[in-house]
Amino acid sequence: MHTRSHHRPPSPVRGAMGDDPIWREGADVVLARTEFYAEKPGGSMGGFVGIDPVSGRRLLVKDAVSERHAACETLANALYRALGVNCPDVRWGVLDGSPVTLGPWAEGYGHAPFDSLAESDLNLIAAFFPADVWLANWDTIGLVYDNLLFDPNARGSKRFLHIDTGGALLFRAQGQPKGAAFGGLASEYETFTVPGKGSKSAYRVFGEIADVRNRVAKMLPMAKNVLTLVGVDYVRRCARWAGFDAAESDALDELMSQRAADLADRIEFDLHQ
């Protein structure tokens, strides 16, 4: 069995989350020794919940359509984490000849009670909204509201956890390429907040419940973090780490720079309305 390990470079953004210590020996080593623990609950892709017999920690092992799809999800998680968004430290490898992603199981998290969240939690949703837009995470909420998890006992930004980011960047959740629908315009700023433009769940949370565009001041720190990342060549380097070749890493870096600038323009426009 062939597996591949990667080591994400440290983030230049203050407050970013460090590497999970479970990867200290390399993702390939952890994947090779992971044992079946339980069936994978929900989601549009197959896989299983495994357990690392050395650390005793549970891991979510999820099928990917291709190595490129797996690399894309790995990159999306790494960029989320570099921005300080609570997200599992996901890696990818090849298991029994097929590409998979693997990451620590979300202990303590469950479905968010979106209709009864406190004002402070709604502000948190607005605070990380620019990251969801920049990464074009079309499945950020999940079809049945199961991709943005919640822990009422956690503090600060860790009250929410982004999982299952296979619908971010270049691919849809089930691995179909977005093609021209993923470009230099951060149009998700509208499609996530205007009815009939994007997924019903995204509009329900971002457009109605949190009403993020009336909390635009809460978005500013994250927007600045996004601009910081693109300003230090982080996307290019992280894409190479995740498994993309040099040409596609360069193209992603340029496209994400364009998206960052367009996102900043949209936020500034709303801020001064």
Image: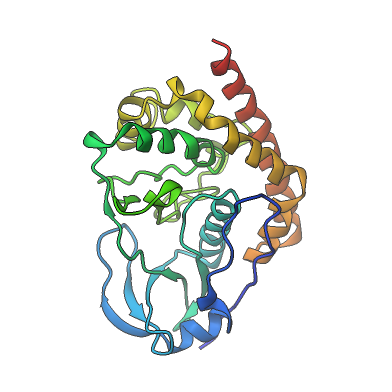
- The image shows residue 141, relative to residue 94, as above or below, that is above
Tell me the residue at 63%/28% (across/down). Answer: 264
For the point 42% across and 27% down, the residue is 212
Identify the coloring: rainbow
Q: Residue furthest top?
A: 273
Tell me if 88 is positioned left or right of 200 in this view. right
Q: Is residue 130 visible?
A: yes
Place of residue 50 in the rendered image (x, y in percent of width and height, measured from the top left) = 34, 79
Between 214 and 140, the residue placed more toward the observer is: 214
Answer with the quarter of the image where residue 191 lies.
top left
Residue 41: image location, x then y, percent: 25, 64
Q: In the displayed structure, does residue 40 sit left or right of residue 140?
A: left
Up-down: is 199 above or below 249?
Answer: above
Picture coordinates of residue 17 (x, y %)? 56, 58
- Residue placed most toward the observer, 240 or 182: 240
Locate the C terminus by quadrant.
Answer: top right
Q: Judge from the rendering whether residue 99 lies leftward or rightward of residue 246; answer left or right.
A: left
Toward which corner of the image does residue 240 lie, by quadrant?
Answer: bottom right
| Residue at (53, 31) in percent of width and height | 219
Q: Is residue 160 visible?
A: no
Please name the residue shown 67% across and 57% down the image: 11
- 249 relative position to 197: left or right: right
Query: How many tags in the picture?
Result: 0
